[in-house]
Amino acid sequence: MERAERHTGQAERHTGPAARAAGAWRGARSVVPPGYLDAAGCNVPSDRVLDAVMAHLRLERERGGYAAVPDLTTPKAALAALVGAGPGDVAFLESGTAAMAALLGGWRLAQGSRVGHARTEYGGTLMLLRHLAVLRGWSLVELPVDGDARLDLDGLRAGLVAGLDLVVVSHIGSHRGVVQPASEIGTLCRAAQVPLVLDVCQSLGHVEVRGAGASAYVGTSRKWLAGPRGVGFLIVPGPTTAMDAAAPTLGGHVWNEPSPSGGEHTLPVPLPGAARYESSEGAIAARVGLGVAVLEHHALGPSGVHEHLADLGRTARDLLDGAGGWRVAEPPDEPSALVTLTPPPGDTAENAAARAAAASLLVSVVPTGRAPLDLREPVLRVSPPPGTPPETLHALARVLAGERREPSHAEQPARSRIRPQR
């Protein structure tokens, strides 16, 4: 009986929603770079995404850029649905970093306000928080994490009781594939009536985000959603009167409030919803491409994608931990496909990435500046996109162990599927 159950489980693994999502994801791309293991840096857009970007650029050339402005309501609704919000809650910007700066830079927190974050916070966000703390007189409070770098919920609860005015959390870090308990964090913050900003740059399209109930979500196109570069976004379900863009714009604000000094001057007032944050000028074709990528993600079935990526992560950790003395930083069963490894004595992440590149394997190096409070040395980051052949991970294990990589039959078709230029 036990053997039969095992066999049934294996069959479902190869024919269930996760396997179908992986096959469809891979099949939607006529070109996938061989040995590609950097989805967490910049994923591979589908053919439809590429075609949509090119088609809009052609339309701008044929009609004029401002005559070709697209209706992005449907893509915004699809993006918002991934966190349980609506299309009016979405604003497009140029990057996740730009989105975070627009959000925090315009948040009217009083002098002396206390902002909580973990030591695992993304280096760019820490830079911004420290900059704003000096300018605005905010106090930054480091929230405790456990041995796996997961936010300690009792510590967060104590911090909220002691008094916090804002909490900023990266759902999955750039340097460590640990999934923070976003739903529990959101529940605690809402109970304390403290706004939560959730950075979903590494989690949207990767793991489940709905249920966090955050006050704002900051994300990017190019990672697990597999959209084009040059697009970031904010999802703000109901901005409060204290929330505005860092700088008012004619596209996101109106002139209709009298100036306190009197006279004929008026002050800018933000438009309803997230429109106050959106940059009206930008790479519009790339935003169109992101919309196509998000709709494709829905068509694949997000839960199947999440399940498949979690399985890829477990496989990668099992194969890579201990290879050549390299150690995986995350728990083996962490439900993410972002895997980080620390080097053995005498080796470095930079050297390992170079050896991998020589074997036609693309991985990335995470420098300490990405998480200056948490990283003591650069780490090697492995992030397989959906449909990654198992042989690619086996090949990387051999490279880390000092063995020479042989060409992979599973990757040969990727080289021959290159479409002619049009």
Image (spheres, rainbow, N blue to C red):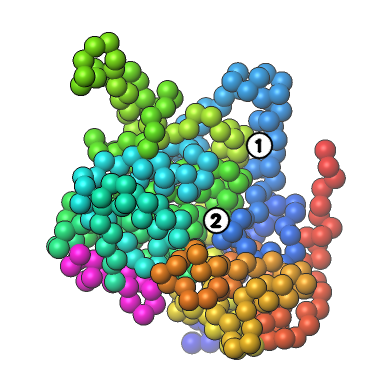
Packing grade of label 2 (10 A; few <14, some 14-19, many >=20) is many
The reply to whether the magenta stretch includes residue 158 is yes
Disc sitting over residue 146 in the figure? none
From the viewer's perspective, tell me whether residue 331 is left or right of residue 137: right
Could you tell me which secondary element the residue under label 1 belongs to? helix
Residue at x 24% of width, y 19% of height = 259
Q: Position of residue 37 (x, y in %)?
A: 64, 66
Sooner in the amino-acid sequence: mark 1 or mark 2 = 1
Figure disc tally: 2
Residue 195 in the image: above or below residue 371: above
Could you tell me which secondary element the residue under label 2 belongs to? loop
Residue position for label 2: 224
From the viewer's perspective, tell me whether residue 403 is left or right of residue 113: right
Query: Quadrant of the rendered structure where residue 273 is?
Result: top left
| Quadrant containing the C terminus in the rendered view | top right
Q: Quick one: which residue is furthest to the left in this view?
A: 161
Q: Position of residue 304 (x, y in %)?
A: 51, 60
Q: Quick one: which residue is furthest to the top in this view?
A: 264
Residue at x 54% of width, y 84% of height = 327
Residue position for label 1: 52
Residue 233 in the image: above or below residue 43: above
Q: Nearer the viewer, residue 393 or 126?
A: 126
- Callout 1 amino acid: Ala
- Callout 2 amino acid: Trp
Residue 205 in the image: above or below residue 228: below
Residue at x 21% of width, y 19% of height = 261
From the viewer's perspective, tell me whether residue 339 is left or right of residue 252: right
For marks 1 and 2, give the CA distance. 18 Å
Q: What's drawn in magenta, residue-wise? A: 145-159
Packing grade of label 1 (10 A; few <14, some 14-19, many >=20) is many
Q: Nearer the viewer, residue 367 or 335?
A: 367
Q: Nearer the viewer, residue 360 or 342?
A: 342
